[in-house]
Image (cartoon, rainbow, N blue to C red):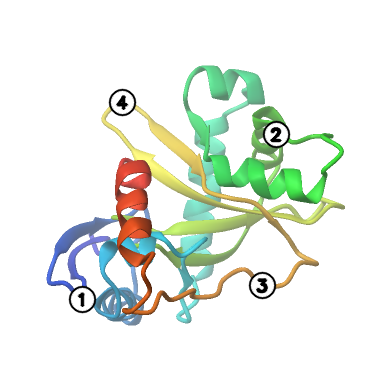
């Protein structure tokens, strides 16, 4: 298998990277090079992660779509949430609420239902975790939702984590927001992320 390898971050910390797809050598090199530019916590602070320039192959995309289908497997959004097979991070609801401030549709079930109907993978992103996230969408979706997700593979089942949501007509959110070394808030912001998001 070509889906498990060690990666090192700029602060010399390391993790064992393991994902659902088999990687091409240039993709592995790119992931390792991205990691070397950041600490793990700094990468996790980037909203959706850094998109890979070495794009996924058709076979790799098919693996992502097929595994997502296996997880949802004819279940309703309500069932997937109750069984904890799909989890929605708070940022996803925040993005949806900003899009629909009147309160329409900003709930977990709405987002999970959108995920159920996705059938395409747009790109893969690296966010400092032991696996990539994948931006999914549906060709038949008139609202053109794009949903970055990650797969959490456990012994008995696989879970899907909805990281955020954004829209095809919005400004690209895959940007790197850096924090200057002299920024007074850097230490507090890093501590906040470690305390609140390291578990994901």
Secondary structure, mark 3, is loop
**Cβ atoms under marks 1 and 4 closer than 8 Å:** no
Alpha carbon distance from label 2 to label 3: 23 Å
- Disc 2 designates what residue? 113
Q: Quadrant of residue 120?
A: bottom right
Whole-percent x and y of residue 88?
A: 55, 37
- Left or right: residue 82 versus residue 54 is right
Alpha carbon distance from label 2 to label 1: 38 Å
Q: Quadrant of the N terminus?
A: bottom left
- Disc 4 designates what residue? 156
Alpha carbon distance from label 2 to label 4: 23 Å
- Disc 1 designates what residue? 10
Closer to the chain start, of discs 2 and 3, is 2
User: Residue 81 versus residue 187: which sits nearer the camera?
Assistant: 187
Q: Quadrant of residue 112?
A: top right
Alpha carbon distance from label 3 to label 4: 36 Å
Alpha carbon distance from label 1 to label 4: 34 Å
Whole-percent x and y of residue 106?
A: 74, 36
Q: Looking at the picture, does residue 31 appear above or below residue 187?
A: below
Closer to the chain start, of discs 2 and 1, is 1
User: Residue 17 versus residue 103: which sits nearer the camera?
Assistant: 103
Closer to the chain start, of discs 1 and 4, is 1
User: Residue 46 versus residue 49: which sits nearer the camera?
Assistant: 46
Visible in this render: residue 161?
A: yes
- Left or right: residue 43 versus residue 164 is left
User: Residue 152 versus residue 109: which sits nearer the camera?
Assistant: 109
């Amino acid at each position: 298998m070509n889906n498990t390898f060690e990666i090192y971050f700029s602060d010399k910390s390391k993790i064992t990277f393991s994902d659902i797809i088999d990687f091409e050598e240039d993709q592995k090199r790119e992931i390792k090079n991205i990691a070397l530019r950041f600490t793990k916590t700094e990468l996790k602070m980037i909203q959706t992660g850094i998109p890979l320039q070495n794009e996924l192959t058709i076979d790799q995309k098919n693996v992502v779509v097929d595994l997502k289908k296996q997880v949802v497997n004819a279940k309703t959004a309500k069932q997937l949430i109750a069984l904890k097979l799909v989890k929605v991070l708070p940022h996803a609801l925040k993005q949806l609420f900003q899009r629909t401030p009147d309160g329409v549709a900003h709930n977990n079930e709405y987002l999970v239902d959108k995920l159920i109907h996705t059938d395409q993978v747009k790109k893969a992103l690296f966010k400092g975790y032991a696996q990539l996230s994948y931006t999914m969408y549906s060709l038949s979706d008139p609202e053109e939702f794009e949903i970055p997700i990650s797969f959490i593979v456990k012994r008995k089942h696989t879970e899907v984590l909805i990281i955020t949501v954004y829209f095809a007509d919005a400004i690209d959110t895959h940007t790197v927001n850096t924090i200057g070394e002299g920024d007074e808030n850097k230490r507090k912001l890093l501590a906040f992320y470690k305390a609140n998001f390291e578990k994901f």
